[in-house]
Image: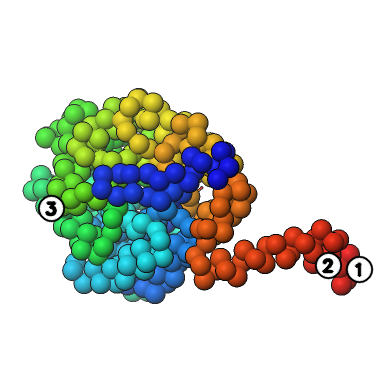
Amino acid sequence: MSPKSAALFQPLTLSGVTLPNRIGVSPMCMYGATNGHAADMHLIHLGRFAMGGAGLVLVEATAIEPRGRISHHDLGLWADSHIAPLRRIADALRAEGTVPGIQLAHAGRRASVREPWRAGAPLDETDAAAGSPPWQTVAPSAVEPGPGWPRPRALTAAEIRTSIDEWAAAARRAVEAGFDVVELHGAHGYLLHQFVSPLSNLRDDEWGGDDERRLRYPLEVVRAVRAEIGDRALLYRVSSIDGPEGGRRIEETVAFAHRLRAEGVDLVDASSGGLSTDRSRDLRVRRTFGYHADFSRSVREAGAGPVATTGYIVDAEQAAMLVENGDTDLLLLGREMLDDPNWPQHARRRLDAEEAAHWHPRFGSAIVPRLGSLQRLVERGEGPLARFGR
Ligand SMILES: Cc1cc2nc3c(=O)[nH]c(=O)nc-3n(C[C@H](O)[C@H](O)[C@H](O)COP(=O)(O)O)c2cc1C
């Protein structure tokens, strides 16, 4: 293996789980579930990444209760009937050499919306007429995420307790479905994030009122989930900054990361933003290559354990350097993987890192010898357009 690629293809052990390399697939909602149940589409979509050499595949945001779905078509784990179709996916991913993981989520006040290709807007009576009615959203406080959004109902203290049990029950089902990694979606303005931020949590009871009480819900959720998953790996996705002015800053996230670690989180996954749907108030992190790497680095350097970064990781050398230079321990690629599910293998080719040994043999035995044949043709001056005189 070439020295520059060594870090990228090192295993990473988190609790009792070892990822074979540092390339993971970030969770991505596909809006293709029926009443929370996974479909063949999910198996095919996620299976591509396993065969392409990813070390970890995280199944998209999966709701812990029906009200916590972003849309009518999100995956769920609030009922035992969700387990079997997800188990089929976890088993298939493992059989093809990757570690299967799943992200558990509750959208809170950002639930009840249309798919992104229908602008992700809140559902209304036109959707109801078409058979997809909106539902009453819930949140720590009755504050809309932005103009034009319905007002959520504040959860009662009793509902908060029930909700913690629902996270734990979903985690138990994730284990039953065969997942080795559970990620909690604590970012992007969804319920866990709503509890943490002073902009969305205006409570003045044991679940809000000061920093300590705002952290209580996520920390209790972590504790309850940790107790269910044994030595499987627990990841927590944070919004490193809230987004809107006056929101939480990276210094507060670093302190939170220490608390998460103390409750049994194995890795903090640094994303950002999403608290407000009002783009004009949002101090969005500028989208540049590796745009969350400063945040993951801050958490890592503060000694809050291993971290992941996500966002515009597109190039093999960039990815290798992010790990090697200590910006991150794990890379979570999203859209780049949708574009090229064989990205990890192509990264091996670029970095001269034992590509042949790591292809799935069914693919590798066909692809790798052909690379040599094609190379010899090119060396003889025969390009693919030679028959057209070019
Ligand atoms: C179609 C799509 C769906 C997404 N769904 C989720 C999700 O379910 N949970 C989550 O934490 N992030 C979600 N994200 C964010 C991605 O996981 C990822 O962090 C982000 O796209 C940045 O990485 P990229 O530049 O490699 O795409 C989604 C992104 C896309 C494009």
Left or right of 152 on screen, residue 270: right
Q: Are marks 2 and 1 in contact (CB under 8 Å)?
A: yes
Q: Is residue 130 visible?
A: yes
Q: Which is more N-terminal, label 2 or label 3?
A: 3
Tell me the residue at 33%/49% (across/down). Answer: 18
Amino acid at dot 1: Gly
Q: Secondary structure at mark 1?
A: loop
Residue 204 picture location, percent across and down: 15, 33
Q: Which residue is mark 1?
A: 389
Instruction: Tell me the mark number nearer the camera, choosing from 3 and 2.
Output: 2
Foreground mark, 3 or 1, reads: 1
Q: Residue at x 57, y 69 (%)?
A: 365
The spot of residue 245 in percent (x, y) is 40, 30
The CA distance from mark 3 to mark 2 is: 62 Å
Quadrant of the image occupied by residue 112:
bottom left
Give the spatial CA distance, label 2 vs label 1. 7 Å
Q: Position of residue 86 (x, y in %)?
A: 30, 67
Could you tell me which secondary element the residue under label 3 belongs to? helix
Percent across and percent down for residue 235 are 30, 45
Q: Amino acid at mark 2?
A: Leu
Depth check: 345 or 336 in front? 345
Secondary structure of the residue carrying tag 2 is loop
Earlier along the polypeptide chain: callout 3 or callout 1?
A: 3
Sort mark 1 into few (<14), some (14-19) or many (20+) by Cα contacts within 10 Å. Answer: few
Q: Quadrant of the C terminus?
A: bottom right
Q: Which residue is mark 2?
A: 385
Q: Who is closer to the viewer here, 165 or 389? A: 389
Q: Which residue: 44% across, 40% down?
A: 309
Outermost residue toward the left?
Answer: 158
Q: Marks 3 and 1, Cα distance to the nearest angstrom?
A: 69 Å
Q: Of 25 and 73, which appears nearest the observer?
A: 25
